[in-house]
Amino acid sequence: MKKIFFAFSIPCFLAGTASAQSSVTLYGIVAGNVTYANNVQIGATPSSGKPIGGAQVAQLDGSSSGLGTSRWGVKGSEDLGSGINAIFQLESGLNINNGTLGQGGTEFGRQAWVGFSESRYGRLTLGRQGDTSVEFVSPLLYAFSWGNLAIRPDDYDNLNFTHRINNSIKYLSASYNGLRFGALYSLGGAAGSPGQNQVWSAGTSYTGAVFSFAASVSSARNPNNSLYGTNANASATGNNFGSAGSSTTAESNPAIAGFASAERQQTISVATTYTAGAVIFGVNYSNTQFRGLGSMASLNTLSYSGSTTLSTAGINLRYQATPFLRFGTSFDYTYGGSAGDRTGAKYEQWNLGAAYSLSKATDLYLTGAFQHATGIDSLGRSAVAQIGYLSPSSSDKQVAFSAGIKRLF
C-alpha cells in the first residue's frame, strides 16, 4: 500500500538538546465505496431452521470492503546521536460513512507505541502493535490488496491485521541483504497470573528483486481476551470471537465464534512471491490451532473439548498493465474446524480487483468476491458464506462488489 507523507517540524520537540534533530509526520488514508452484496443475513436461527436475509446496497468505509482502511496518525523521531533515534507512532482507525472510531471505539486502536531505532541493528518498541505475521507475511498477500473482501473467513489467522497486541514488546531487525527477522512478546497484564494473557510471535522474511519469502509463528494464551478482546468495546467475560445471533440479529464470525473457550490459539503462516516483469505470482498457507477447547466453561455453550484447526491455501496473481493501471486475482481454500462429533467446514473464495491511479495519492478501485461454504461451522450449524467484514449470508453462497476511491495524505 502506497503512502505519501508530508513532514513538518514541531518547535517544542526540539527543546532540551540543542543538537537533536526531531520531526513529526502527519499521515492517513481516506477510503470509501459503494458495495453490493447479493445476500446479507438479518437474522439467525438454530441449526434446525434457516437464517433469513437478502440483497443489500450500502455505502461502506474502506475498512469494511475497500482497497485500504481509513485512518490517520502521527509518527516521529528524534536523533539521540551515535545512530540512535527515539521513535513513536500513534494511529487511529475511522469510519468515513459515519465518522466513528475504528477498532471498537479505541482512540488509537490501530497502533500506539514508542521505542528506539538504530540503522545497523533495527528497532525496539513498546505498546499496542501487530505481531510478526502482520509485519512479515501480510505484505506478500495484501500487496495484491484487492480489498478487505479478500480476507480469510473471519480473518482467523490475523493476516489482515484485525487484532492488535496490547502491552507488547517488539524487536524488528534491520535488513541484511534483504533478510529481516523479529519477535514480539506481550506481558499479558493479568494480576496474580503473569502468563494468563501472554502472546508471543516470531518471524522472518527475505525480499529480493525476483523472489520473496516470509514465515511467522504466533501463540496467544486465553485468546478471547489477549487477542480478540483488546479493543475498547471488548467484553471481560463474554464472547469476543463472535456471536450466534438471534431471530433479529445476524451471526458474527460464524467460522470461529464457537471456539472462544480455547485456552490457546497458535498460528503458523508462510508466503512466497515470484516477480516476472509486470507480473507477480504468489502462494501462501496458514494454519491456526484452537487448543484446550472448554477451558473457559462459560463460553463453551456447545460443550467442545480437545482442539481444532483451520487452514487456508491460497494463490495470488497481480499484473501491472501500465504505470497507472493494475489488475489482480486470488483464490483461497479454507478447511477445518471440526469439533466434538461435528464435521468441519470448507470455504472456497475467488477475488478480483482493479485499481487506477489518478495521481500518486489517489486511486479509483473496483473489487469483487464470490464465496461458497459447505459443511458445519463452529456454531454447529450449516456453514454460511461470509465475505470479508460483511455480514454473513443466509445461504452457502455470497457475491459482493465494491467500487470506490482511496486518498492518501
Image: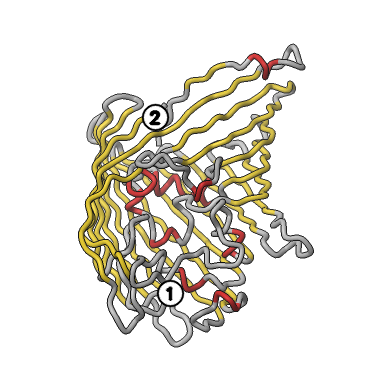
Residue bearing mark 2:
408
- Decide which of 220, 234 is in the foreground and name it: 234
Question: From what the image shows, is residue 131 above or below residue 291?
Answer: above
Task: Give the residue type at disc 1.
Answer: Ser
Q: Residue at x 44, y 40 (%)?
A: 94
Is 139 left or right of 196, judged from the image as shown? left
Is 165 left or right of 72, judged from the image as shown? right
Residue 376: percent from left, percent from top? 36, 78
Question: From what the image shows, is residue 402 above or below residue 396?
Answer: above
Task: Give the residue type at disc 2.
Answer: Leu
Q: Disc count in the image?
A: 2
Residue 336: percent from left, percent from top? 41, 73
Residue bearing mark 1:
378
| Figure quadrant of residue 77 | top right
Can the viewer see residue 68 in this picture?
yes
- Residue 278 is tagged as none
C-beta proximity under 8 Å, tags 2 and 1: no
- In which quadrant is the C terminus drawn? top left
Element under disc 1:
loop
Can the viewer see residue 136 in this picture?
no
Residue 61: percent from left, percent from top? 35, 43
Q: Residues within 10 Å of mark 1 (few under 14, many from 20)?
A: many
Question: From what the image shows, is residue 119 above or below residue 21?
Answer: below
Residue extending furthest toward the right: 192
Residue extending furthest toward the bottom: 341
Q: Earlier in the sequence, mark 2 or mark 1?
A: 1
| Figure quadrant of residue 295 | bottom right
- In which quadrant is the N terminus drawn? top left
Q: Residue at x 35, y 37 (%)?
A: 31
Residue 384: percent from left, percent from top? 31, 70
